[in-house]
Amino acid sequence: MHIPDGYLSPQTCAVMGAAMLPVWATAVKKVKQTLKTRYVPLMAIGAAFSFVIMMYNVPIPDGTTAHAVGGALLAVILGPWAASISITVALAIQALLFGDGGILAFGANAFNMVFVLPFSAYYIYRLIAGRSEVSSARRWIGGLAGGYIGIVLAAVCAGTEFGLQPLLFHAANGSALYCPYPLSMALPAMALAHLAVAGPIEGVITALVIRYLQVNNPALLSIESVQAPVESRGYKKLWWGLAILVLFTPLGLLALGTAWGEWGVGELKDKLGYIPAGMQQMADRWHALMPDYGLPGFDHSFLQSATGYILAAVVGVAVIAGITYLFSRAQKNAGRDVFPPDKKAKGTEIK
Protein backbone atom coordinates (compact mmCIF):
# COMPACT_ATOMS: atom_id res chain seq x y z
CA MET A 1 0.00 0.00 0.00
CA HIS A 2 3.10 2.23 -0.10
CA ILE A 3 2.60 4.12 -3.35
CA PRO A 4 5.97 4.95 -4.97
CA ASP A 5 6.69 8.22 -6.71
CA GLY A 6 5.67 8.20 -10.35
CA TYR A 7 2.43 6.28 -9.95
CA LEU A 8 0.43 9.39 -9.07
CA SER A 9 0.45 12.68 -10.94
CA PRO A 10 1.90 15.79 -9.27
CA GLN A 11 -1.63 17.19 -9.13
CA THR A 12 -2.89 14.12 -7.29
CA CYS A 13 0.03 14.26 -4.88
CA ALA A 14 -0.65 17.94 -4.19
CA VAL A 15 -4.35 17.36 -3.53
CA MET A 16 -3.71 14.42 -1.22
CA GLY A 17 -1.00 16.31 0.65
CA ALA A 18 -3.30 19.30 1.07
CA ALA A 19 -6.06 17.03 2.35
CA MET A 20 -3.73 15.73 5.06
CA LEU A 21 -2.61 19.13 6.35
CA PRO A 22 -5.71 19.78 8.50
CA VAL A 23 -5.54 16.19 9.79
CA TRP A 24 -1.94 16.61 10.94
CA ALA A 25 -2.61 20.08 12.35
CA THR A 26 -5.60 18.86 14.35
CA ALA A 27 -3.73 15.77 15.55
CA VAL A 28 -0.80 17.84 16.81
CA LYS A 29 -3.14 20.28 18.53
CA LYS A 30 -5.07 17.52 20.28
CA VAL A 31 -1.97 15.60 21.32
CA LYS A 32 -0.30 18.74 22.69
CA GLN A 33 -3.17 19.08 25.13
CA THR A 34 -2.36 15.70 26.68
CA LEU A 35 1.45 15.54 26.77
CA LYS A 36 1.36 15.36 30.56
CA THR A 37 -0.15 11.88 30.29
CA ARG A 38 1.83 8.97 28.87
CA TYR A 39 1.27 9.67 25.19
CA VAL A 40 4.86 10.37 24.19
CA PRO A 41 6.37 6.98 25.15
CA LEU A 42 3.27 5.08 24.07
CA MET A 43 3.22 6.92 20.75
CA ALA A 44 6.89 6.06 20.25
CA ILE A 45 6.22 2.39 20.91
CA GLY A 46 3.22 2.61 18.60
CA ALA A 47 5.25 4.17 15.79
CA ALA A 48 7.97 1.54 16.20
CA PHE A 49 5.39 -1.26 16.22
CA SER A 50 3.75 0.04 13.05
CA PHE A 51 7.14 0.40 11.37
CA VAL A 52 8.19 -3.15 12.21
CA ILE A 53 4.88 -4.88 11.53
CA MET A 54 4.83 -3.42 8.01
CA MET A 55 8.07 -5.30 7.29
CA TYR A 56 6.20 -8.60 7.63
CA ASN A 57 5.15 -9.15 4.03
CA VAL A 58 2.73 -11.99 3.35
CA PRO A 59 2.10 -13.66 -0.02
CA ILE A 60 -1.04 -13.06 -2.07
CA PRO A 61 -2.32 -15.79 -4.44
CA ASP A 62 -1.79 -13.54 -7.49
CA GLY A 63 1.97 -13.49 -6.84
CA THR A 64 2.09 -10.11 -5.09
CA THR A 65 2.44 -9.40 -1.37
CA ALA A 66 0.71 -7.33 1.30
CA HIS A 67 1.19 -6.46 4.96
CA ALA A 68 -0.61 -5.28 8.06
CA VAL A 69 -0.17 -1.70 9.29
CA GLY A 70 -1.07 -1.88 12.97
CA GLY A 71 -3.16 1.26 12.62
CA ALA A 72 -6.29 -0.25 14.13
CA LEU A 73 -4.49 -1.41 17.26
CA LEU A 74 -2.84 1.98 17.76
CA ALA A 75 -6.19 3.71 17.35
CA VAL A 76 -7.78 1.47 19.99
CA ILE A 77 -4.99 2.09 22.51
CA LEU A 78 -3.96 5.67 21.75
CA GLY A 79 -7.07 7.06 20.10
CA PRO A 80 -7.16 7.92 16.38
CA TRP A 81 -5.45 11.30 16.62
CA ALA A 82 -2.37 10.10 18.49
CA ALA A 83 -2.32 6.97 16.32
CA SER A 84 -2.24 9.14 13.21
CA ILE A 85 0.92 10.86 14.44
CA SER A 86 2.60 7.56 15.28
CA ILE A 87 1.86 6.09 11.86
CA THR A 88 2.98 9.30 10.15
CA VAL A 89 6.37 9.01 11.86
CA ALA A 90 6.67 5.37 10.76
CA LEU A 91 5.77 6.20 7.14
CA ALA A 92 8.18 9.14 7.03
CA ILE A 93 11.10 7.00 8.20
CA GLN A 94 10.17 4.29 5.71
CA ALA A 95 10.10 6.75 2.82
CA LEU A 96 13.19 8.77 3.73
CA LEU A 97 15.56 6.05 4.92
CA PHE A 98 14.36 2.96 3.09
CA GLY A 99 12.61 4.18 -0.05
CA ASP A 100 9.37 2.44 0.91
CA GLY A 101 6.71 4.79 -0.41
CA GLY A 102 7.33 7.94 -2.39
CA ILE A 103 8.32 11.36 -1.12
CA LEU A 104 5.89 13.17 -3.42
CA ALA A 105 3.28 10.48 -2.81
CA PHE A 106 3.65 10.79 0.96
CA GLY A 107 0.36 12.68 1.31
CA ALA A 108 -1.54 9.94 -0.51
CA ASN A 109 0.07 7.18 1.55
CA ALA A 110 -0.69 9.13 4.70
CA PHE A 111 -4.30 9.67 3.67
CA ASN A 112 -4.78 5.92 3.27
CA MET A 113 -2.82 4.62 6.27
CA VAL A 114 -2.77 7.61 8.65
CA PHE A 115 -6.31 8.87 8.20
CA VAL A 116 -8.64 6.29 6.64
CA LEU A 117 -7.35 3.20 8.43
CA PRO A 118 -7.08 4.29 12.08
CA PHE A 119 -10.14 6.53 12.10
CA SER A 120 -12.47 4.04 10.44
CA ALA A 121 -11.09 1.20 12.59
CA TYR A 122 -11.50 3.23 15.78
CA TYR A 123 -15.11 4.19 15.22
CA ILE A 124 -16.06 0.66 14.16
CA TYR A 125 -14.39 -0.56 17.35
CA ARG A 126 -16.26 2.01 19.46
CA LEU A 127 -19.54 1.12 17.73
CA ILE A 128 -19.18 -2.55 18.66
CA ALA A 129 -17.45 -2.18 22.03
CA GLY A 130 -19.64 0.67 23.21
CA ARG A 131 -19.34 1.14 26.96
CA SER A 132 -18.90 -2.53 27.65
CA GLU A 133 -16.70 -3.79 30.45
CA VAL A 134 -12.98 -3.92 29.70
CA SER A 135 -13.11 -7.71 29.89
CA SER A 136 -16.04 -7.97 27.49
CA ALA A 137 -15.70 -9.99 24.29
CA ARG A 138 -17.17 -6.99 22.50
CA ARG A 139 -13.78 -5.30 22.86
CA TRP A 140 -11.75 -7.82 20.88
CA ILE A 141 -14.60 -8.44 18.45
CA GLY A 142 -14.71 -4.70 17.80
CA GLY A 143 -10.95 -4.67 17.28
CA LEU A 144 -11.20 -7.58 14.86
CA ALA A 145 -13.91 -5.90 12.82
CA GLY A 146 -12.28 -2.48 12.96
CA GLY A 147 -8.89 -3.78 11.87
CA TYR A 148 -10.35 -5.81 9.02
CA ILE A 149 -12.63 -3.11 7.64
CA GLY A 150 -10.18 -0.27 8.27
CA ILE A 151 -7.34 -1.69 6.21
CA VAL A 152 -9.72 -2.78 3.44
CA LEU A 153 -11.08 0.77 3.20
CA ALA A 154 -7.52 2.09 3.06
CA ALA A 155 -6.75 -0.34 0.23
CA VAL A 156 -9.89 0.72 -1.64
CA CYS A 157 -8.72 4.34 -1.41
CA ALA A 158 -5.28 3.38 -2.74
CA GLY A 159 -6.85 1.39 -5.58
CA THR A 160 -9.03 4.37 -6.46
CA GLU A 161 -6.03 6.69 -6.50
CA PHE A 162 -4.19 4.28 -8.80
CA GLY A 163 -7.17 3.73 -11.08
CA LEU A 164 -8.00 7.39 -11.60
CA GLN A 165 -4.57 8.17 -13.05
CA PRO A 166 -5.01 6.75 -16.59
CA LEU A 167 -8.50 8.28 -16.71
CA LEU A 168 -7.37 11.78 -15.76
CA PHE A 169 -3.78 11.94 -16.98
CA HIS A 170 -2.84 10.53 -20.36
CA ALA A 171 -0.90 11.49 -23.46
CA ALA A 172 -2.44 12.58 -26.76
CA ASN A 173 -2.31 9.00 -28.00
CA GLY A 174 -4.24 7.81 -24.95
CA SER A 175 -1.32 6.14 -23.17
CA ALA A 176 -1.15 6.61 -19.41
CA LEU A 177 1.34 9.13 -18.04
CA TYR A 178 1.48 7.64 -14.56
CA CYS A 179 -0.14 4.49 -13.16
CA PRO A 180 -1.24 2.58 -16.27
CA TYR A 181 -3.89 0.41 -14.60
CA PRO A 182 -7.53 1.58 -14.80
CA LEU A 183 -10.07 1.40 -11.99
CA SER A 184 -11.38 -1.89 -13.35
CA MET A 185 -7.99 -3.46 -12.55
CA ALA A 186 -6.53 -1.40 -9.72
CA LEU A 187 -9.56 -1.38 -7.44
CA PRO A 188 -10.20 -5.16 -7.46
CA ALA A 189 -6.49 -5.93 -7.14
CA MET A 190 -6.06 -3.77 -4.06
CA ALA A 191 -9.39 -4.64 -2.48
CA LEU A 192 -9.20 -8.41 -2.95
CA ALA A 193 -5.65 -8.70 -1.58
CA HIS A 194 -6.74 -6.97 1.60
CA LEU A 195 -10.14 -8.62 1.84
CA ALA A 196 -8.53 -12.06 1.60
CA VAL A 197 -5.17 -11.70 3.36
CA ALA A 198 -4.06 -8.36 4.81
CA GLY A 199 -7.48 -7.58 6.30
CA PRO A 200 -7.72 -10.79 8.33
CA ILE A 201 -4.14 -10.31 9.53
CA GLU A 202 -4.77 -6.71 10.64
CA GLY A 203 -7.97 -7.77 12.37
CA VAL A 204 -6.50 -10.81 14.11
CA ILE A 205 -3.43 -8.89 15.33
CA THR A 206 -5.70 -6.21 16.78
CA ALA A 207 -8.00 -8.74 18.43
CA LEU A 208 -5.17 -10.83 19.90
CA VAL A 209 -3.41 -7.84 21.43
CA ILE A 210 -6.68 -6.52 22.86
CA ARG A 211 -7.34 -9.94 24.38
CA TYR A 212 -3.82 -9.96 25.84
CA LEU A 213 -4.31 -6.50 27.32
CA GLN A 214 -7.66 -7.51 28.80
CA VAL A 215 -5.79 -10.05 30.90
CA ASN A 216 -2.44 -8.34 31.50
CA ASN A 217 -2.94 -4.57 31.23
CA PRO A 218 -6.66 -3.71 31.09
CA ALA A 219 -5.95 -0.08 31.98
CA LEU A 220 -4.99 0.57 28.35
CA LEU A 221 -8.46 -0.50 27.27
CA SER A 222 -10.42 1.53 29.81
CA ILE A 223 -12.83 4.23 28.72
CA GLU A 224 -10.11 6.75 29.54
CA SER A 225 -7.56 4.64 27.65
CA VAL A 226 -3.97 5.81 28.06
CA GLN A 227 -4.75 8.06 31.00
CA ALA A 228 -4.74 4.96 33.18
CA PRO A 229 -1.41 4.45 34.91
CA VAL A 230 1.22 2.37 33.16
CA GLU A 231 4.28 1.53 35.20
CA SER A 232 7.73 1.99 33.71
CA ARG A 233 8.35 -1.74 33.68
CA GLY A 234 5.26 -2.00 31.49
CA TYR A 235 7.09 0.03 28.87
CA LYS A 236 10.08 -2.26 29.16
CA LYS A 237 7.88 -5.26 28.42
CA LEU A 238 6.54 -3.54 25.33
CA TRP A 239 10.04 -2.70 24.10
CA TRP A 240 11.17 -6.28 24.69
CA GLY A 241 8.19 -7.52 22.73
CA LEU A 242 9.13 -5.15 19.93
CA ALA A 243 12.71 -6.47 20.00
CA ILE A 244 11.39 -9.98 19.41
CA LEU A 245 9.39 -8.74 16.42
CA VAL A 246 12.55 -7.12 15.05
CA LEU A 247 14.51 -10.38 15.28
CA PHE A 248 11.85 -12.23 13.32
CA THR A 249 11.42 -9.61 10.56
CA PRO A 250 13.31 -11.77 8.00
CA LEU A 251 10.15 -13.87 7.85
CA GLY A 252 8.85 -11.03 5.70
CA LEU A 253 11.51 -11.86 3.11
CA LEU A 254 10.02 -15.30 2.54
CA ALA A 255 7.06 -13.76 0.72
CA LEU A 256 8.27 -13.46 -2.85
CA GLY A 257 6.94 -10.85 -5.22
CA THR A 258 6.22 -7.15 -4.96
CA ALA A 259 3.13 -5.58 -3.47
CA TRP A 260 0.61 -4.57 -6.11
CA GLY A 261 1.32 -1.05 -7.38
CA GLU A 262 4.80 -0.89 -5.85
CA TRP A 263 6.82 -2.19 -8.80
CA GLY A 264 9.96 -0.31 -9.73
CA VAL A 265 10.23 1.15 -13.21
CA GLY A 266 12.36 -1.77 -14.42
CA GLU A 267 9.90 -4.35 -13.14
CA LEU A 268 6.97 -2.42 -14.56
CA LYS A 269 8.69 -2.19 -17.96
CA ASP A 270 9.03 -5.97 -17.97
CA LYS A 271 5.28 -6.23 -17.38
CA LEU A 272 4.12 -3.54 -19.81
CA GLY A 273 6.91 -3.27 -22.34
CA TYR A 274 7.22 0.46 -21.67
CA ILE A 275 7.41 3.00 -18.86
CA PRO A 276 4.76 5.74 -18.73
CA ALA A 277 6.38 9.08 -19.57
CA GLY A 278 5.31 10.91 -16.43
CA MET A 279 6.36 8.04 -14.22
CA GLN A 280 9.79 7.95 -15.82
CA GLN A 281 10.30 11.61 -14.94
CA MET A 282 9.16 11.31 -11.31
CA ALA A 283 10.38 7.88 -10.24
CA ASP A 284 13.64 7.12 -8.43
CA ARG A 285 14.58 10.73 -7.71
CA TRP A 286 15.07 10.02 -4.02
CA HIS A 287 17.98 7.75 -3.12
CA ALA A 288 17.35 6.11 0.23
CA LEU A 289 20.12 5.18 2.65
CA MET A 290 19.03 1.53 2.85
CA PRO A 291 16.77 0.89 -0.16
CA ASP A 292 14.30 -1.96 0.27
CA TYR A 293 15.43 -2.41 3.89
CA GLY A 294 18.80 -3.82 2.96
CA LEU A 295 22.45 -3.01 2.51
CA PRO A 296 23.43 -2.32 -1.13
CA GLY A 297 25.55 -5.19 -2.41
CA PHE A 298 24.92 -7.26 0.71
CA ASP A 299 22.13 -9.43 -0.65
CA HIS A 300 23.83 -12.41 -2.27
CA SER A 301 22.30 -14.91 0.15
CA PHE A 302 19.27 -15.14 2.39
CA LEU A 303 21.54 -14.77 5.43
CA GLN A 304 22.91 -11.49 4.10
CA SER A 305 19.45 -10.22 3.20
CA ALA A 306 18.12 -11.27 6.61
CA THR A 307 20.98 -9.50 8.37
CA GLY A 308 20.33 -6.33 6.41
CA TYR A 309 16.60 -6.59 7.10
CA ILE A 310 17.13 -6.88 10.84
CA LEU A 311 19.62 -4.01 10.75
CA ALA A 312 17.07 -1.88 8.89
CA ALA A 313 14.47 -2.65 11.54
CA VAL A 314 16.93 -1.74 14.29
CA VAL A 315 17.80 1.53 12.53
CA GLY A 316 14.13 2.41 12.11
CA VAL A 317 13.29 1.71 15.75
CA ALA A 318 16.43 3.54 16.91
CA VAL A 319 15.49 6.63 14.90
CA ILE A 320 12.01 6.61 16.44
CA ALA A 321 13.49 6.19 19.92
CA GLY A 322 15.97 9.00 19.23
CA ILE A 323 13.24 11.36 18.08
CA THR A 324 11.26 10.54 21.21
CA TYR A 325 14.26 11.15 23.46
CA LEU A 326 15.06 14.52 21.88
CA PHE A 327 11.43 15.54 22.06
CA SER A 328 11.11 14.54 25.70
CA ARG A 329 14.32 16.43 26.55
CA ALA A 330 13.02 19.51 24.79
CA GLN A 331 9.73 19.27 26.67
CA LYS A 332 11.56 18.77 29.96
CA ASN A 333 13.73 21.82 29.33
CA ALA A 334 10.56 23.74 28.58
CA GLY A 335 9.20 22.72 31.96
CA ARG A 336 6.64 20.21 30.77
CA ASP A 337 6.36 16.83 32.47
CA VAL A 338 6.30 14.24 29.70
CA PHE A 339 6.90 11.31 32.03
CA PRO A 340 4.77 12.07 35.11
CA PRO A 341 4.41 10.01 38.27
CA ASP A 342 2.15 6.97 38.08
CA LYS A 343 -1.22 8.46 38.79
CA LYS A 344 -4.40 8.61 36.85
CA ALA A 345 -5.09 11.75 34.86
CA LYS A 346 -8.76 12.29 34.20
CA GLY A 347 -10.48 13.93 31.29
CA THR A 348 -7.53 13.88 28.92
CA GLU A 349 -8.42 11.24 26.37
CA ILE A 350 -7.69 12.19 22.79
CA LYS A 351 -10.91 11.52 20.94
Image (cartoon, helix red, strand yellow):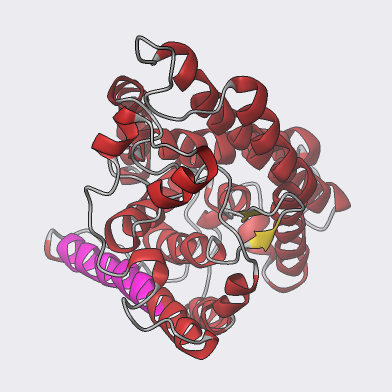
- Secondary structure character of the magenta stretch overall: helix
Q: Is residue 321 left or right of residue 308?
A: left
> Would you say 299 lies left or right of 121 here?
left
Can residue 2 be seen? no
Q: Residue at x 34, y 45 (%)?
A: 102
The image shows residue 183 at horizontal and vertical percentages of 60, 21
**Which quarter of the picture shows residue 317?**
bottom left
Q: How many marks?
A: 0
Image position of 186 with respect to 247: above or below:
above
Q: Residue furthest right?
A: 137
Residue 13 x, y percent position in the rendering? 33, 28
Q: Residue furthest bottom?
A: 303
Q: Is residue 242 above or below residue 223?
A: below
- Check if residue 123 falls in the magenta segment: no
Percent across and percent down for residue 219 are: 64, 62
Against 13, residue 5 (above or below) is below
Q: Is residue 112 visible?
A: yes
Q: Residue at the location (63% across, 65% down)?
A: 256
Residue at screen point 70% across, 66% down: 213
- Residue in the foreground of this view, choosing between 342 and 85: 85
Residue range corresponding to the magenta coloring: 314-332
Please tell me in which quadrant of the rendered image residue 15 appears.
Answer: top left
